[in-house]
Amino acid sequence: MKYEVGDKIIVLHSDEEGKVVELMNDKMVMIEVRGVRFPAYMDQIDFPYYKMFTQKKVVEKKTIHIDNVKKEKQSPRKKVADGVFLSFVPIFDKDIFDDEIVEKLKVYLINHNEEEYQFKYKLKFVGISNFELNSSLRALSDFYLHDIMFEDIGDSPSFEFEFSLEKPDKKKSPFYESQIKLKGKQVFKKIEEIQLRNEPSFAYELFKVYPDKVEEIKMDLSKLGNAGYRFYDISKAKEFLAPARSVVDLHIEKLTDKWDQLSNFEIISLQLETFENYLELAHLHHLSSVIMIHGIGEGKLKDEIHERLHYKKYVKSFVNQYHHLFGYGATEIFLVS
């Protein structure tokens, strides 16, 4: 290994000096430059003394008069405030055929803004929470979250964040939510792209600028009342809702008598519309869970339902396991109370 932890280095493309803080693999190291850590390929850095011996410095001789010496102005360099990102660093290994494969991804939260944030973080696989963290993110810094095995990308990992300002500002939003969901093909393409560009990582923008507070819109209800509209107490809203069901059978023959006259597209559209309606009713009626019977078949209805559940904020988790009444043909959905 050319480098060791603690070695001083210089970044070739920027001439900035730093040091090695972690040996990632036989091609990459983690370096620290001006307090910021980031991964780099070994051919992107070198030892500073090599530059000292290979470059000749031209020093112009001048006569300096003591009354002409000016006080040096300190102008610290800062990163451009261009957003907060979720960054992934592929870690490579060799398989039994000595081919290079991706073993895992190192996950970092990168802050290129000059604001500090508090954040709540959740990693979910197929909608089920796997890792949670509450912490703070300093300005112009990065935060290592964890590793994710590359084989787990097929389980639809979802990276969910809730940000808030470290120093509250009345003009700014009290919080901001952002989510990144990875898919296998998408990750493969990203890794191929960074290998072609000889870059160590790829990233997704979580937000560019922390949002301002949205002012509440006050509506004059007196005009609507004079126009004949009726108003109801929100606490009695459930009285005007259709009843909810704890078990919903989505088999098409349960939904319509004319199912044999429908195309396949019309059938699945009706099933999904029914699913959406009863899931929403279960949420509005504050049910803790609801079972959707989708059957087994080719799995198209089940897959579409599971895909949509990932984007429902009031869905805590869901599971498709053997049930003594429905076998594997139903999904139980647990809702946020």
Image (cartoon, rainbow, N blue to C red):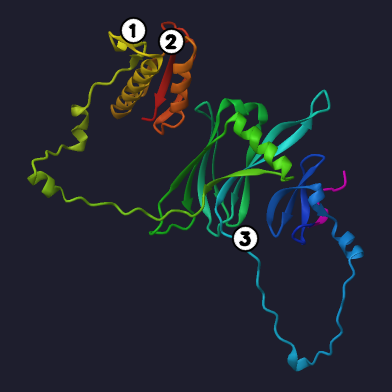
Q: Where does residue 84 sit, x and y in percent of width and height?
A: 55, 50
Q: Residue at x 88, y 65 (%)?
A: 52
Mark number, residue 77: none
**Which residue position holds label 1?**
260
Residue 185 forms part of the magenta stretch: no
**Span colored in magenta:** 1-10
Q: Main secondary structure of the magenta part?
A: loop
Instruction: Left or right? Give the position of 26 relative to 206.
Output: right
Q: What secondary structure is found at the residue carrying circle 3?
A: loop
Mark toward the start of the polypeptide (1 vs 2): 1
**Which residue position holds label 2?**
295
Q: Nearer the viewer, mark 1 or mark 3?
A: 1
**Which residue position holds label 3?**
79
Q: Give the amino acid at mark 3.
A: Lys
Label 1 – label 3 distance at C-alpha = 63 Å
Near-viewer residue (65 or 168): 65
Label 2 – label 3 distance at C-alpha = 54 Å
Dot 2: within a 10 Å radius of its alpha carbon, few (fewer than 14), some, or many (20 or more) residues? some
Q: Where does residue 139 sit, x and y in percent of width and height?
A: 57, 57
Q: Where does residue 174 sit, x and y in percent of width and height?
A: 40, 51
Q: Give the amino acid at mark 1.
A: Asp
Quarter of the image that includes the N terminus? top right
As drawn, 136 above or below 300: below
Q: Residue at x 75, y 51 (%)?
A: 31
As drawn, 71 above or below 8: below
Q: Give the amino acid at mark 2.
A: Gly
Which quadrant of the structure image shows residue 133?
top right
Q: What secondary structure is found at the residue carrying circle 2?
A: loop
As drawn, 7 above or below 145: below
Mark toward the start of the polypeptide (1 vs 3): 3
